[in-house]
């Protein structure tokens, strides 16, 4: 571990990555009295990358600590109910009492809101800054970018997603993301489904999983998890004509109810290709010296969990609290200790659901049994969602060092 100036607190930070985790981390650091600058590889805000995501009650609570409750609520569609769908059979899942409903949020809308909020707070976001290396010493860390420029601060935070560069700088042997076996697609269609807006149906079709819900304007939003043997880079997936992808989707979901009617209603020009779906395995090293990971770079659960953005917001808050209260060499272990058990438990639960969503030949054979188990679990919302959704971070509670770092 790089020798750090003992008993020193971080006052400045470089946040690598301007997606969801980056701006939230920078705002949390500012709340803690730490000046942060965000460095993003893309030349502009990442419009058009990613589809709809779920912002769970715990994630909304984390963003509320940053004063963003109203902004986020305005761009989200409340999930007023959920159902498991098997063909024409729908099983309504009881709601969890005493929490705000989860929100369906377009990633681009959330990205815009977070960038606007960060900028309004005076946080600088620099684009066209692709990190290629970093050097640490006892007084700081220097980031090197592909354009030849550098930046220096007390701390460097990797909020650069599942394909994180910072993760490999911290640990060259760090695991990379794991492909879930599915490609993501999404579309909004003028084909109404029964029921009020905001009831999300998790549908298990004959050949693959999909989900759909009625939007506020009466249209239907549908998302597909298309089984695919190998991952495809997003740029490559988008070079394939939408009409070609749409034919694959129609072949896969065409016999499902209502999936068949929904997929046939899609205009090829409206099909959104989201690419391969990834998760992160357990990362052995979250930090080293003056570098630390946050968000999807260190914990990216399957989208089955509905927790990716929410856990990223939580981790941003916990990292900022630790840096506020402790010297750097104690803050980073305290942050990891606060976060690792929670995020790895949620990721493990999501992996179980993923095996149902993208079943292999053996799993498909026992699907009826798996479905009975899934329904049994889903019918107990307190056990299934309570510990995750009711999680609350007390911003004012002082952070104590871990026993090992005292």
Image (cartoon, helix red, strand yellow):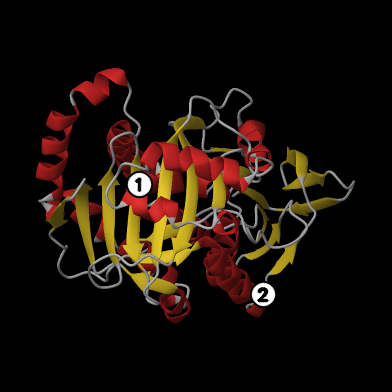
Please state which of residues 102 and 232 is positioned toward the viewer in this rendering: 232
Instruction: Of the two numbered discs 2 and 1 on the same chain, state the one appearing first in sequence.
Output: 2
Reading the image, the residue beneath label 1 is 210
291 sits to left or right of 202:
right
Which residue is painted at 44% across and 57% down in the image? 265
Which residue is painted at 34% across and 37% down in the image? 208
370 sits to left or right of 349:
left
135 sits to left or right of 13:
right
Query: For the N terminus, which image quadrant?
Result: top right
Residue 213: % across, % down: 33, 62
264 sits to left or right of 353:
right
- Please say whether residue 261 is visible from this viewpoint: yes
Looking at the rendered structure, the secondary structure element under dot 2 is helix
Classify 10 Å Cα crowding around label 1: few (below 14), some (14-19), many (20 and above).
many
75 above or below 327?
A: below
Q: CA distance from mark 2 to mark 1?
A: 37 Å
Please state which of residues 381 and 138 is positioned toward the viewer in this rendering: 381
Reading the image, the residue beneath label 2 is 119
Residue 179: % across, % down: 49, 31
Can you tell which quarter of the image residue 74 is in? bottom left
């Amino acid at each position: 571990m790089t020798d750090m100036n003992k008993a020193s607190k971080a006052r400045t930070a470089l946040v690598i990555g301007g997606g969801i985790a980056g701006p939230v981390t920078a705002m949390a650091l500012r709340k803690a009295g730490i000046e942060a600058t965000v460095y993003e590889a893309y030349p502009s805000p990442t419009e058009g990358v990613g589809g709809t995501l779920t912002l769970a009650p715990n994630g909304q609570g984390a963003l509320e600590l940053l004063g963003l409750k109203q902004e986020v609520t305005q761009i989200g569609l409340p999930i007023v109910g959920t159902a498991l769908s098997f063909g024409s059979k729908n099983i309504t899942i009881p709601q969890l009492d005493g929490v705000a409903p989860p929100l369906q949020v377009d990633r681009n809308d959330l990205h815009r809101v977070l960038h606007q909020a960060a900028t309004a707070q005076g946080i600088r976001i620099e684009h066209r800054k692709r990190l290629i290396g970093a050097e640490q010493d006892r007084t700081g860390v220097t980031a090197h970018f592909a354009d030849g420029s550098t930046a220096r601060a007390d701390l460097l935070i990797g909020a650069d997603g599942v394909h994180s560069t910072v993760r490999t700088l911290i640990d060259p042997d760090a695991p990379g993301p794991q492909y879930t076996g599915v490609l993501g697609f999404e579309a909004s269609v003028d084909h109404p489904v029964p029921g009020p807006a905001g009831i999300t149906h998790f549908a298990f079709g004959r050949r693959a999983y999909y989900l759909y819900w009625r939007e506020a304007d009466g249209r239907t939003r549908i998302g597909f998890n298309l089984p695919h043997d190998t991952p495809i880079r997003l740029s490559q997936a988008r070079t394939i004509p939408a009409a070609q992808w749409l034919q694959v989707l129609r072949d896969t979901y065409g016999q499902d109810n209502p999936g068949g009617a929904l997929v046939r209603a899609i205009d090829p020009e409206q099909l959104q290709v989201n690419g391969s779906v990834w998760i992160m395995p357990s990362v052995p090293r979250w930090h080293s010296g003056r570098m630390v990971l946050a968000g999807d770079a260190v914990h990216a659960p399957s989208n089955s969990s509905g927790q990716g953005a929410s856990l990223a917001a939580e981790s941003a808050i916990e990292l900022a609290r630790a840096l506020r209260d402790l010297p750097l060499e104690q803050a980073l272990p305290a942050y990891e200790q606060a976060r690792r058990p929670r995020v790895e438990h949620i990721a493990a639960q999501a992996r179980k659901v993923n095996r149902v969503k993208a079943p292999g030949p053996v799993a498909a054979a026992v699907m009826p049994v798996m479905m009975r188990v899934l329904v049994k679990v889903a019918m107990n919302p307190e056990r299934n969602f309570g510990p995750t959704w009711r999680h609350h971070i007390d911003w004012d509670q002082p952070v104590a060092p871990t026993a090992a770092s005292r």
